[in-house]
Image (cartoon, grey):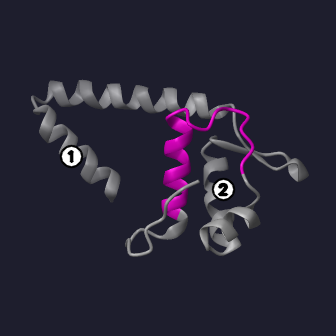
Amino acid sequence: MIALDPGSPVPPYEQLRAGLAARVNAGELAVGTKLPTVRALAAELGLAANTVARAYRELEAAGLLETRGRAGTFVGAGSDDVLARGRDAAARFAEEARALGLSAELALDLARAALTR
Protein backbone atom coordinates (compact mmCIF):
# COMPACT_ATOMS: atom_id res chain seq x y z
CA MET A 1 0.00 0.00 0.00
CA ILE A 2 2.77 2.44 0.97
CA ALA A 3 6.52 2.07 0.49
CA LEU A 4 8.54 2.99 3.57
CA ASP A 5 12.23 3.88 3.61
CA PRO A 6 13.89 2.32 6.68
CA GLY A 7 16.96 4.52 6.18
CA SER A 8 14.99 7.76 6.18
CA PRO A 9 15.31 10.18 9.09
CA VAL A 10 11.51 10.60 8.85
CA PRO A 11 9.78 8.37 11.43
CA PRO A 12 7.81 5.42 9.99
CA TYR A 13 4.44 6.72 11.27
CA GLU A 14 5.07 10.02 9.43
CA GLN A 15 6.10 8.23 6.23
CA LEU A 16 2.90 6.18 6.44
CA ARG A 17 0.74 9.21 7.31
CA ALA A 18 2.18 11.26 4.45
CA GLY A 19 1.92 8.38 1.99
CA LEU A 20 -1.71 7.68 2.81
CA ALA A 21 -2.57 11.39 2.73
CA ALA A 22 -0.92 11.71 -0.69
CA ARG A 23 -2.89 8.75 -2.05
CA VAL A 24 -6.16 10.12 -0.67
CA ASN A 25 -5.49 13.62 -2.01
CA ALA A 26 -4.48 12.25 -5.43
CA GLY A 27 -7.77 10.35 -5.61
CA GLU A 28 -6.03 6.95 -5.57
CA LEU A 29 -8.02 6.11 -2.44
CA ALA A 30 -11.56 7.29 -3.03
CA VAL A 31 -14.01 8.39 -0.37
CA GLY A 32 -15.50 5.30 1.25
CA THR A 33 -12.52 3.04 0.51
CA LYS A 34 -11.99 0.62 3.38
CA LEU A 35 -8.42 0.52 4.67
CA PRO A 36 -6.69 -2.52 6.14
CA THR A 37 -7.00 -3.03 9.87
CA VAL A 38 -4.22 -1.59 12.00
CA ARG A 39 -2.85 -5.07 12.69
CA ALA A 40 -3.04 -6.19 9.06
CA LEU A 41 -1.27 -3.10 7.75
CA ALA A 42 1.33 -3.28 10.52
CA ALA A 43 2.09 -6.90 9.58
CA GLU A 44 2.22 -6.05 5.86
CA LEU A 45 4.66 -3.17 6.44
CA GLY A 46 6.65 -4.78 9.23
CA LEU A 47 5.69 -2.06 11.71
CA ALA A 48 4.35 -2.06 15.24
CA ALA A 49 0.57 -1.79 15.46
CA ASN A 50 0.93 1.40 17.51
CA THR A 51 2.85 3.01 14.63
CA VAL A 52 0.02 2.36 12.19
CA ALA A 53 -2.58 3.37 14.79
CA ARG A 54 -0.83 6.72 15.27
CA ALA A 55 -0.81 7.41 11.53
CA TYR A 56 -4.51 6.50 11.29
CA ARG A 57 -5.34 8.73 14.31
CA GLU A 58 -3.55 11.72 12.81
CA LEU A 59 -5.28 11.23 9.47
CA GLU A 60 -8.61 10.93 11.23
CA ALA A 61 -7.94 14.16 13.14
CA ALA A 62 -7.17 15.86 9.81
CA GLY A 63 -10.48 14.67 8.37
CA LEU A 64 -9.00 12.28 5.82
CA LEU A 65 -10.08 9.05 7.52
CA GLU A 66 -13.01 7.97 9.65
CA THR A 67 -13.28 4.99 11.93
CA ARG A 68 -16.65 3.26 12.09
CA GLY A 69 -16.17 1.10 15.15
CA ARG A 70 -15.91 -2.58 14.34
CA ALA A 71 -16.69 -1.89 10.67
CA GLY A 72 -13.17 -0.51 10.22
CA THR A 73 -11.38 2.56 8.94
CA PHE A 74 -12.44 4.27 5.73
CA VAL A 75 -11.38 7.22 3.61
CA GLY A 76 -13.61 9.96 4.96
CA ALA A 77 -15.87 12.35 3.11
CA GLY A 78 -13.89 15.17 4.74
CA SER A 79 -10.96 14.31 2.47
CA ASP A 80 -12.59 16.29 -0.34
CA ASP A 81 -12.80 19.32 1.99
CA VAL A 82 -9.16 18.90 3.04
CA LEU A 83 -8.04 18.93 -0.58
CA ALA A 84 -10.14 22.01 -1.32
CA ARG A 85 -8.71 23.80 1.72
CA GLY A 86 -5.20 22.86 0.59
CA ARG A 87 -5.82 24.32 -2.85
CA ASP A 88 -7.15 27.51 -1.28
CA ALA A 89 -4.06 27.79 0.94
CA ALA A 90 -1.80 27.24 -2.08
CA ALA A 91 -3.64 29.94 -4.02
CA ARG A 92 -3.24 32.40 -1.14
CA PHE A 93 0.47 31.58 -0.91
CA ALA A 94 0.93 32.08 -4.66
CA GLU A 95 -0.88 35.41 -4.51
CA GLU A 96 1.31 36.60 -1.62
CA ALA A 97 4.50 35.39 -3.33
CA ARG A 98 3.57 37.32 -6.49
CA ALA A 99 2.78 40.44 -4.42
CA LEU A 100 6.23 40.17 -2.81
CA GLY A 101 7.85 39.89 -6.22
CA LEU A 102 9.26 36.42 -5.57
CA SER A 103 10.12 34.24 -8.54
CA ALA A 104 8.20 30.99 -8.84
CA GLU A 105 11.39 29.03 -8.18
CA LEU A 106 12.18 30.93 -4.98
CA ALA A 107 8.58 30.68 -3.77
CA LEU A 108 8.60 26.91 -4.35
CA ASP A 109 11.95 26.60 -2.56
CA LEU A 110 10.53 28.48 0.43
CA ALA A 111 7.41 26.33 0.45
CA ARG A 112 9.45 23.11 0.28
CA ALA A 113 11.65 24.29 3.11
CA ALA A 114 8.62 25.14 5.24
CA LEU A 115 7.01 21.76 4.52
CA THR A 116 10.11 19.80 5.51
CA ARG A 117 10.51 21.53 8.87
Answer with left or right where residue 97 lies relative to residue 33: left
- Numbered circles on residues, count: 2
Residue at x 50%, y 52% (from the top left corner): 19
Spatial CA span between label 1 and label 2:
29 Å
Q: Residue furthest right?
A: 70
Q: Which residue is mark 2?
A: 56
Q: In which quadrant will I find the C terminus?
A: bottom left
Taking the spot 55% from the left edge, 65% from the top edge, the residue there is: 13
**Picture coordinates of residue 58 (x, y %)?**
61, 55
**Which of the two discs, 1 and 2, labels the residue nearer the N terminus?**
2
Tell me residue 50's x, y (percent): 68, 71
Q: Position of residue 72 (x, y in %)?
A: 82, 50
User: Residue 80 in the image: x percent, y percent?
Assistant: 59, 28
Q: Is residue 27 magenta?
A: yes
Crowding at dot 1, Cα within 10 Å, few <14 / some 14-19 / many 20+, comes out as few
Contact flag, marks 1 and 2 (Cβ < 8 Å): no
Q: Nearer the viewer, mark 1 or mark 2?
A: 2
Secondary structure type for disc 2: helix
Q: Amino acid at mark 2?
A: Tyr
Question: What residue does disc 1 label?
Answer: 110
Which stretch is magenta? 14-35
Q: Three-letter amino acid code at disc 1?
A: Leu
**Which element is circle 1 on?**
helix
Q: Nearer the viewer, residue 42 or 117?
A: 42
